[in-house]
Amino acid sequence: MLYVFDFDEDSGGGRELLGGKGIGLAEMTQLGIRVPAGFTITTDACRAYMAGGRTVPEGLDEEVERHVEALEQRSGKGFGDAGDPLLVSVRSGAAISMPGMMDTILNLGLNDSTVEALASSTGNPRFAYDSYRRLIQMYGDVVDGVDGQRFEQALADLKDARGAQHDVDLSADDLRELVESFREIYGDAVRQDFPQDPREQLRRAYRAVFDSWGSPRAQVYRRTYDIPDDLGTAVNVVQMVFGNRGESSGTGVCFTRDPSTGERHLFGEFLANAQGEDVVAGIRTPEPIERMRERMPEAFAQLIETLDRLESHYRDVQDVEFTVEEGELYLLQTRTGKRTAAAALRIAVEMVEEGLIDREEAVARIDPSQLDQLLHPMIDPKAKIEIAARGLNASPGAASGAIVLDADTAEERGKSGEDVILVRWETTPDDIHGLIQARGVLTAHGGMTSHAAVVARGMGKPCVAGCEALSIDFPAGTVTLGDVQLSAGDVITIDGGKGTVMIGAVQLVPPAIDENFGTVLSWADELRRLRVRANADTPEDAAKAREFGAEGIGLCRTEHMFMAEDRLPLVRDMIMARDEEERRASLERLLPLQQGDFEGIFEAMAGLPVTIRLLDPPLHEFLPPPDEATSDAMRDRIRQLHESNPMLGTRGCRLGLQFPEIYEMQVRAIVRAAAAVEERTGDAPLVEIMHPLVGFREELARLRTLTEKVAAETPSVAYTCGTMIELPRAALRADEIAEEADFFSFGTNDLTQTTLGFSRDDAEGKFLTFYLEHGILERNPFEVLDEEGVGDLMRIAVERGRGAKPEMKLGICGEHGGEPRSVAFCHQLGLDYVSCSPYRVPLARLAAAQAALAEAGVTAVAVGG
């Protein structure tokens, strides 16, 4: 196996083999664009190195040596030659861009003798010693772990002593002195002299770049952006070109279009008499790229012409690094430019208008999860933030507000116009009034599908859940974030998209939906097969969902209606009833309120299907904790209803079978609401009545009989009757259950819990975090559908359900319905629709289109670098 390829050599592989940087250098070489000569050590070598326990694969060192010799012949310089030395850079380059996560070393090949040769051959000793001190610092940091701050402090001390404001103000003698200081720092830290053999420098350098693939920061980045750990990084060994050879030299980074707005103009920065790390690492304050036009007009003209060629060739925005050496332009890297969601949409639309790409490719390029940026306020990218604590990124968006510790206070202060953040151990349905008025929610417990997370997503509010660094002292009215104590009323900021908490107010930027958003989604709608519905429990949620393009409601949870202030006393009366007669009396009072809820939802969704799930949670959830009971009778009832594991207890259809009068009231309210809306508007609602937690055919058979009997009281209303598939047995016996059902909807939140044996609130923030950090699981199964386990049960249910009823309507109403990979899986299964929270509807529309495109062989191009 060959592990090393020159830039002009046919490797037989692409980005996965050469990495983003390597493939870019190879393709630019083939296009005739001026790039420095060099070679790429492939990702195969990195993977072999990792698989061998950080041992260099056999033959790699010899192969690298052959390519170094070829580079010497090509350049006419010698690696370590005391007369005319060859210097190289060693740069990482993964197949998927991970900017700043791995390591780079410049000026490799310098030592005590070659630095003198470089000074002599260039006639510029200042440049030579500047390059040498940079090598010692980078090599010491990357290869031997020397604290970079020690080098920075020595540089700062020297500038202070010389009265120099910038590095460029130091003389050649100053830099010669600095080299000696840096060598002393290196020797003190490593307990040996700085290596003088360039080949030893190179061998240790590319090993260090391989090792940087496994660095903590790289691992965190890969987890954040879902990049596989087994890709490995390539290493690019490139002949040095120098931007620090004087005022006719320089370095810069630029984009072919503005990555923040998408505008079609050059965007970037430039530094004269500098090396690339000065720009990328922020060592000096760069100038706008337009200043290069004044300083180096010929090189700037070459740059413009080259950028036009690259964007036309790649048909996408390019992010380019370049160096000018004594007036000559060299490109060091080109890669697809990362961009904001707003920029991505504008660029996609304008490139279609320009004829660079077609609509299908435009839709395929947009990252669905990025759309969250446009639907919620975000932290200003320019804001300086200090993270105080981290939790789960349970609902996107950002908010600042005063800490409040209970829902009543949140409601009161929120209604008065104050921005508040509701901070709780965890929220319950009782907190809904506070959630409505709060700007966001922070909880110490709970996970991605906890009550706080689900409700916040439905409302479009940010939520950080499972923040283990948070502790609350309710009597004292204080909270602790890590080692910082705060009081109720102190201001914090939460970023629900990243799961971070900051102390104090942070500058936010508002949502930014424009015509490009609508244009791209309209293209997506033309391409997708899957329908997209919303999970909505109120007319307001339904209206928002429709605004975002929902094609119906896939899950309306009736229990949320029972928690309203005017309903809860009636619900508690019903639970406290001594017999069926008293229960029916309480339910009769609830009936018109429930009917009104349904009328509002049917009107908001006129002409579209609405799936209403009958009461699901156990009754004790509507009662207060025992110590807050208002009577001995209530305390006794709470004790009677107590269950060791209520999630698997008396809930869902089991509740409806045991207390049929509850479901009778709900069905009656549904059909009466449908009839009333049709009479008022002339539009007949498309009613779907769904029974939860069915595991046996007989359960659904009896509940279907109940449904039909009650619905017959209002014969003008057409409806269908179905069930949620949220138990493994229901999936396995779907053919039997299908005989009693008109539709199935996969409740993947509970199906994941019951299949994996995970309690989601106990798992997230506890052992599941450990599993993810230690690679036992690749992804959180409550965020991304477990295709091999839960997905296999779904596949069985689809095959057996449609085997019994070929035209059976199938959907998904768990939060997975708004997650792109899970949406793609639903497309592959042949489901009819996905349903998600209103604010995820645009994301699901785009993901559904991309699933259809992927099936047709149209996929987005990976971003490398």
Image: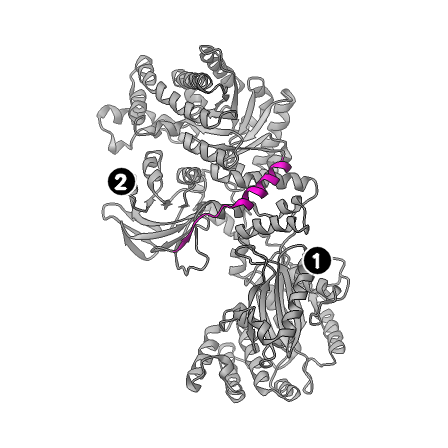
Where is residue 549 shown, x and y percent of the image? 53, 35
Residue numbers of the magenta segment: 507-528
Q: Is residue 834 left or right of residue 81?
A: left
Quadrant of the image containing the N terminus: bottom right
10 in relation to 352, above or below: below
Q: How many marks?
A: 2
Q: The residue tagged with tag 1: helix, strand or loop?
A: helix
Counting residues from the N terminus, which is met first, the one under dot 1 or under dot 2? 1
Where is residue 336 shown, x and y percent of the image? 62, 57
Q: Please tell me which residue lies in front, 631 or 105.
A: 105
Where is residue 200 shown, x and y percent of the image? 64, 76
Q: Which residue sits at x=56%, y=68%?
A: 289
Q: Which mark is residue 313?
A: 1
Residue 499 visible: yes
Q: The residue tagged with tag 2: helix, strand or loop?
A: helix
Disc 1 residue type? His
Q: Is residue 693 left or right of residue 63?
A: left
Query: Residue 35 appears in which quarter of the rendering?
Result: bottom right
